[in-house]
Amino acid sequence: MSPTRRAAVLGSPIAHSLSPVLHRAAYAELGLSGWDYSRHEVDEATLAEFVGKLGPEWAGLSLTMPLKRAIIPLLDEISDTASSVEAVNTVVFTADGRRIGDNTDIPGMLAALAERGVEQVERASILGAGATASSALAALSRICTGEVTAYVRSAARADEMRGWGERLGVAVRTAAWEDAAEAFDAPLTVATTPAGATDDLAAAVPDRPGTLFDVLYEPWPTALAAAWVDRGGAVVGGLDLLVHQAVLQVEQMTGRAPAPLAAMRRAGEAALAGR
């Protein structure tokens, strides 16, 4: 029997994605037996063709790299949140056939931090300057009352982060990656770099550090996160972000709220433990 409603995550590579695990757990908990959530290997070259073939049974899409900007020209409308960082990770198909784009990474970050008691900070640091860093900066624009320092590897990346700061209304200072250990003096450090990039910084974690938000979920814990916990600091992980942004996606796509956060997190933890 084919599903009555469908959703999926698109990206390249996509085989590692936990999104199907999280969304299916939500459907089960909500009793949505006619819903299915899948994953599809789609890159920028094949995105328009894939989206163009979707029928009326489709409720929504999750987008990961490299599609968060490529999807925008294919949409009828995007939210202010998505527009602020020129990145869409969620598409909802309306009953009249419109495609509405949103970004749940930014409110997902805020929810993950709030869950650990971080609702306002006077300073913050960001490690890295990619697409996730711009979302982190957008999140920090809502909770950081002072300066954000971004530690980057090139002058071009520094220019990008200062540009995002101007656009988002955040005071951004940039510093060389070689000085990244200084990031840990801030009450909140957000690590947005690929796996392994911060391993060499683990030895520099100070005694009694603040909060670390490491956006990776595999491998976990990262060397930096493990060192942070060893020194008594609070850590927010990539699974926390993934679950919180997925909760918002489920609510938008299904129209059911609240989505079952605890069940989704348990499913994600079990899936990671089995890898």
Image (cartoon, rainbow, N blue to C red):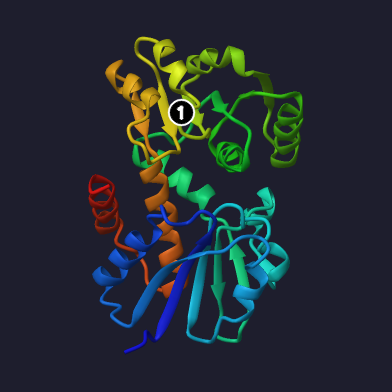
Q: Residue at x 68, y 69 (%)?
A: 77
Q: Secondary structure at mark 1?
A: loop
Q: Nearer the viewer, residue 221 or 183?
A: 221
**Where in the figure is residue 2, as x and y percent of width and height?**
36, 87
Which image quarter: residue 33? bottom left
Position of residue 267 in the picture relative to residue 252 (left or right): left
**Where in the figure is residue 101, as x and y percent of width and height?**
61, 65
| 267 versus 101 height, above or below | above
Position of residue 228 in the picture relative to residue 253 (left or right): left
Query: What's the amino acid at mark 1?
Result: Gly
Q: Residue at x 32, y 24 (%)?
A: 226
In the rendered picture of this protein, how many numbered marks are placed on residues? Answer: 1
Q: Nearer the viewer, residue 164 or 129?
A: 129
Q: Residue at x 62, y 38 (%)?
A: 130
Neighbor class of circle 1 (other Cα within 10 Å; few <14, some 14-19, many 20+) is: few
**Where in the figure is residue 107, as x and y percent of width and height?**
50, 50
Residue at the spot of label 1: 196
| 110 versus 210 height, above or below | below
**Where in the figure is residue 254, as x and y percent of width and height?**
42, 74
Name the residue at the bottom extreme. 1
